[in-house]
Image (cartoon, rainbow, N blue to C red):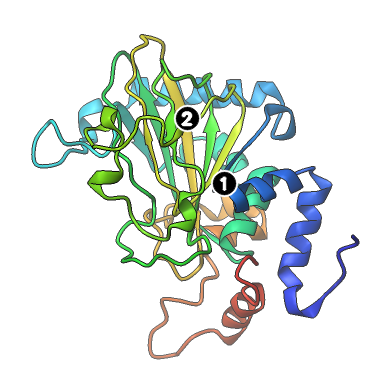
Amino acid sequence: MEIGDWKATSELNQVYKKARELGLETNIAELEAFGFTIVEPGKVAPAQFAERVLEVTLKLADEEDPGAVKLSGESENVKPAYGRQLFHLLTKDPCFTEMIINPAALTLASYMAGASCRLYSTVAFIKEGNANPTVLHCDSTGMPPPLPYFGNLVNVCWILTDYTVEKGTLFFVPGSHRYCRHPNKSDLPKFMGGSGDDDCGSPVIARSGSLLIFHGNLWHGTYPKTSEATRIHLSITYCRNYINPAENFDDVSDEMILNAGERFARLIGRDAWQGYHSEGSDINRMAAVRSAQMHPSA
């Protein structure tokens, strides 16, 4: 059908028209039904772009001190994610800005987290050699159940190396975004130390250059990595405008914003209505947010 300029879904109309233009309607259906989707490399960006991002990421990993970031629990045996993580990438190379405002990535993020969505975090996950599995969880961290059915967060993963089971790819439980709760230990498959069936979920098999997008409620973890081949993806997470982003983007220069455009400025919160003092909130900024959230998916 033809998408009209319907007032009740004013922002959603534009997002959906863009999805149709980019050939992403099937991906939207998969996100709704299963909680995740994979956009093939040809629809995302030229192959050279993924190669460039991979080169930049490896260079950053070589230059940054591995000991500067140490995510662990009460002991070395309890970690939220194994391997290296590189945080706060936005200002480290122009390619990361390009990723954030990439039409396919931003269109699907806007559908899931709203036309007024914000940038939540930018993280590179790098695994070399063997690694233990990451335990089943969802990204709606700190949110008590029941979780809202709509996406408060959406994870857009840029796959930079081919993802296979041997390389410790992600493990998804399709449809679990509809459970609207966090997984319990009894939900974990045996290979993660739980009592559930190992086939309760499915591996993500994706080629380098693909986009993997998933709902913030979706249960996911990783398989153990048994290959010596390096495994890398960039996780760009977007959130609804009322969520407090994980990263602080106050180091983004005015020049970067001028080059990237108005939408980029909104993504990093430069025109957010929150954060006022005694002068009160900016009514125009509040109105812009309201018009973009007249529909749960807008």
Q: Hey, which quadrant is residue 113 in on the image?
A: bottom right
Query: In the depicted view, which residue is nearer to us: 238 or 53?
Result: 238
**Mark 1: which amino acid?**
Phe
Local packing at callout 2 (Cα closer than 10 Å; few below 14, some 14-19, many 20+) is many
Image location (x, y in percent) of residue 293: 61, 74
**Residue 34 shows which numbered tag?**
1
Secondary structure of residue under mark 1: helix
Q: Mark 1 near mark 2, Cβ–Cβ under 8 Å? A: no
Image location (x, y in percent) of residue 231: 43, 20
Secondary structure of residue under mark 2: strand
Q: Which residue is mark 2?
A: 233
**Is residue 109 in view?**
yes
**Would you say 290 lies left or right of 191 here?**
right
**Residue 223 shows which numbered tag?**
none
Determine the residue positioned at 75% across, 73% down: 10
Cα–Cα gap, marks 1 and 2 = 21 Å
Q: Quadrant of the C terminus?
A: bottom right
Image location (x, y in percent) of residue 54: 52, 23
**Would you say 182 lies left or right of 279 here?**
left
Residue placed farthest to the right in the image? Answer: 2
Specify which label sits upstream in the sequence, 1 or 2.
1
Query: In the depicted view, which residue is nearer to us: 159 or 279?
Result: 159
